[in-house]
Image (cartoon, rainbow, N blue to C red):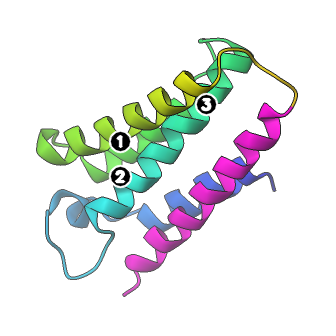
């Protein structure tokens, strides 16, 4: 399974069926907003690289972010703003560092995905606590 598929599978498996938890700001279990923001930032970084190399029509990582927003901040508000801001921060960070697609960027994207996978694992585990 690819890193990207693992990230999404882990994230979705851990978050499936928990919209009630996602809507509450403070819960006994579930991820902290800081952890979700870390994942959102990683998704933004990966999206910037993917868009640079494949064009703006490749919305792969942005779609994963949209799914996370739908699960973790369906009502909008401050929670959604924090996550969206983190995604945009990650996107801008990568975009400012890289102006052209180079052969090494596939490896950079894989490294970013590995970071995201680790964060997604911690998010999934937080729902089990």
Tell me whether circle 3 and circle 2 mark residues in contact (CB < 8 Å).
no
- SS class, disc 2: helix
Task: Point out the frontmost of discs 1 and 3.
Answer: 1
Going from N to C along the chain, the mark reached first, 3 or 2, is 2
Label disc, if present, on residue 86 of the rendered structure:
1
Structural crowding at the residue carrying mark 1, measured as other residues with C-alpha within 10 Å and reported as few (<14), some (14–19) or many (≥20): many
Tell me whether circle 1 and circle 2 mark residues in contact (CB < 8 Å).
yes
Residue drawn where x is 44% and y is 44% of the image = 41
Image quadrant for the C terminus?
bottom left
Residue drawn where x is 66% and y is 50% of the image = 113
The CA distance from mark 3 to mark 2 is 18 Å
The CA distance from mark 1 to mark 3 is 17 Å
Going from N to C along the chain, the mark reached first, 1 or 2, is 2
Asked whether 99 or 26 is in front, the reply is: 99
Find out whether residue 64 is within the magenta segment: no
- Residue 66 picture quarter: top left
Where does the image place residue 52, in percent across and percent down from the top left?
66, 18
Residue drawn where x is 52% and y is 64% of the image = 119
Placement of 96 over or under 42, stated as above or below: above
- SS class, disc 3: helix
Give the magenta-colored segment's residue range.
104-129
Asked whether 17 or 98 is in front, the reply is: 98
Find out whether residue 107 is within the magenta segment: yes
Tell me whether circle 1 and circle 3 mark residues in contact (CB < 8 Å).
no
Task: Point out the frontmost of discs 3 and 2.
Answer: 2
Q: Residue tagged by mark 2?
A: 37
């Amino acid at each position: 399974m690819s890193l990207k598929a693992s990230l999404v599978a882990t994230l979705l498996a851990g978050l499936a069926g928990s919209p009630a938890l996602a809507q509450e700001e403070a819960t006994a279990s579930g991820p902290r907003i800081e952890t979700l923001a870390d994942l959102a930032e990683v998704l933004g970084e990966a999206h910037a690289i993917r868009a640079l190399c494949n064009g703006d029509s490749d919305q792969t990582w942005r779609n994963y972010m949209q799914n996370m927003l739908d699960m973790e901040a369906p009502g909008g508000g401050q929670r959604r703003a924090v996550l969206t801001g983190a995604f945009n921060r990650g996107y801008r960070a990568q975009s400012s560092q890289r102006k052209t697609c180079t052969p090494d960027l596939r490896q950079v994207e894989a490294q970013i995905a590995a970071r995201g996978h680790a964060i997604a694992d911690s998010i999934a585990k937080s729902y089990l606590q």
